[in-house]
Amino acid sequence: MAPQELRYDGQTVVVTGAGGGLGREYAIFFGSRGANVVVNDLGGSFKGEGGGSQAADKVVDEIRSAGGKAVANYDSVENGEAIIKTAIDSFGRIDVLINNAGILRDISFKNMKQQDWDLIYKVHVKGAYKCARAAWPYFRKQKYGRLISTASAAGLFGSFGQTNYSAAKLALVGFTETLAKEGLKYNILCNVIAPIAASRMTETVMPPDVLENLKPTWVVPVVAVLTHKSSTETGSIYDAGGGYVSKLRWERAKGALLKPDDSLTPGAIAARWKDVTNFAEPEHPQGPANAMELLEAAVELSPSPA
Ligand code: NAD
């Protein structure tokens, strides 16, 4: 099947935070390609205040009036089991989970209140965990599942005024990388996207001409490919936005191998600092350094200079 014709007939897709922004675009796309869609959104402000059923209902109406199948769910992602229950009660299955719901509580670290930290953690990390935890037994039983987590450049690289958000977003990377490993033998593929798009989250921090070139619909295609049954990709991170899509990976410097004995002093490390930070011959690790191999190689070494 040509990629432009990717379809999801008979599958159930849960999109969290689908009442607006990116989530709305995912929901409308899947609804137009044959999927049953659960449109989850509690309808609050971008700071996580207030709520209502309108946001989700509007998207459900849009999907239905275009001939698609969708139901609304108004629970917070912190109650992930209720969201997955809506999928099972309405459509009898769950195939794809897009963990997309999110809020911002931007503030400098000096001025951050406990609530700013806790709310961000609750929506992004606990919310993604609760939804994935509720979907997981279904994915395992049917030996099929596709999961997307939504990280952010703020988490990957840091971003002024966003310690809470950055911590939560990078937590989702570790979470999803591990789910990818645990899910592999059940054909549960789990990936992370770090999107950039015009939405109420970005409209106050980016100028209109930039936002014009960051339509949220342009993030949809990579998510569509990663969640399709033909995909084999898992455990990866993708940058997506403004028409640009790229895979990201870790890079490890060549490093220094020192004999693990009393000669391993701060001075010995300092003397090898060039090697510690030398990216001329990098590795792209999939896991921690192979400890046993390193240990054997280190034992062969003569004492390092003090
Ligand atoms: P958005 O505010 O338009 O959409 C987020 C949606 O999540 C809203 O409709 C909101 O009501 C919903 N939501 C919030 N808390 C919820 C909860 N507890 N339970 C259920 N729904 C909840 O923002 P967006 O830009 O579309 O963001 C979507 C995702 O992408 C978020 O996870 C965000 O952190 C991430 N992201 C966005 C950008 C960007 O450039 N827009 C960049 C990096 C990451």
Image (cartoon, helix red, strand yellow):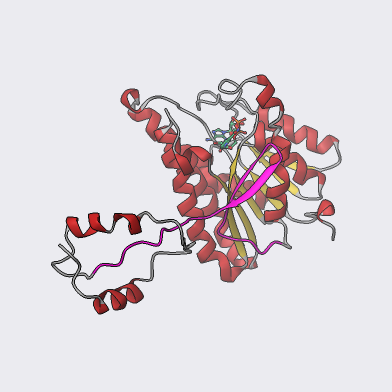
Q: Dividing the image into four equal quarters, which quarter contains ligand 1? A: top right
Quarter of the N terminus within the rendering: bottom right
Q: Work out whether residue 90 can be spotted.
A: no
Residue pictured at 50% horizontal, 43% vertical: 127
Q: Which quadrant holds residue 273?
A: bottom left
Residue pictured at 45% horizontal, 33% vertical: 159
> Looking at the picture, how far across and down is residue 8, in whole percent?
77, 54
Instruction: Give the overall secondary structure of the magenta segment.
Output: loop
Asked whether 205 or 132 is in front, the reply is 205
Q: Is residue 234 magenta?
A: yes
Quarter of the C terminus within the rendering: bottom left
Residue pictured at 67% horizontal, 28% vertical: 55
> Looking at the picture, how far across and down is residue 9, in whole percent?
80, 55
Asked whether 251 or 216 is in front, the reply is 251
Residue pictured at 61% horizontal, 36% vertical: 196
> Looking at the picture, how far across and down is residue 253, in whole percent?
41, 58
In-image side of 80 versus 221 (left or right): left
Q: Which quadrant holds residue 200?
A: top right
In-image side of 262 versus 157 (left or right): left
Compared with 136, 79 (above or below) is above
> Looking at the picture, how far across and down is residue 63, in whole percent?
79, 38
**Number of numbered discs on residues:** 0
In-image side of 248 versus 215 (left or right): left
Q: Is residue 163 magenta?
A: no
Q: Work out whether residue 109 can be spotted.
A: yes
Residue stretch rendered in magenta on the structure: 231-258
In-image side of 181 versus 265 (left or right): right
